[in-house]
Image: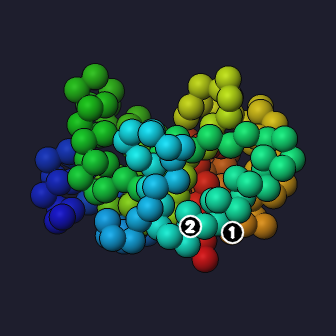
Amino acid sequence: MALAPLWAELGIPSDYATFRNLTLQVEAGMGELVSVAPDGDFPPILLTVPAAAAWASMHHAAAGAGITLIPVSGFRSVARQGEIIREKLARGLNLPDILRLVAAPGYSEHHTGRAIDITAPDDPPLEAGFAQTSAFEWLQAHARDFGFTLSFPPGNPHGIAYEPWHWLWQP
């Protein structure tokens, strides 16, 4: 998908990537992705095969420590990223605020199939309160052992809001 027309439609400034210090993310092909969601979850939560294997190992290790990690989202296409921004604009949010919460199409780590959003039981998904859970504490101590890093800590250089739930697998 061509980014320039989509960005023009959404009103994303041409210097966005430079201003946010973000790099273009290559969209994974559907043939590279597998579901990591519990059976029957729809829509499926997809990761690339290697990221899914790392997630399975991490998920298993956490369970062995009495920690429940629940996947919320994985792969997201460039087109879907555009839809998310359109939905937020339609709800009356302004673009600068949206772009502090959601990366512009082409720049979301979710495009790669290596990013996963995680929650815990009794924790609302995609909320900063996740940082107060034992699941987050476990992830901070152990996620690196499985190749996962927290992409958007407080005060990150991208100007993206703190996302304690968002973890990227880096081979």
Which residue has dot 1 on it? 147
Q: Nearer the viewer, residue 171 or 4?
A: 171
Residue at (59% x, 25% y) in the render: 124
Q: Is residue 24 toward the left or the right of residue 61 in the image?
A: left
Image quarter in which the N terminus is found: bottom left
Q: Is residue 164 toward the left or the right of residue 60 in the image?
A: left
The kind of residue on which mark 1 rests is Gly
Q: How crowded is mark 2: few (under 14 residues within 10 Å), some or many (20 or more)?
A: many
Residue at (31% x, 56% y) in the render: 77
- Dot label at residue 93: none
x and y percentages locating residue 125 in the rendered image:
56, 31
The kind of residue on which mark 2 rests is Ala
Residue 83: quarter of image: top left
Q: Is residue 62 toward the left or the right of residue 81 in the image?
A: right
Visible residue check, residue 13: no
x and y percentages locating residue 45 in the rendered image:
45, 49
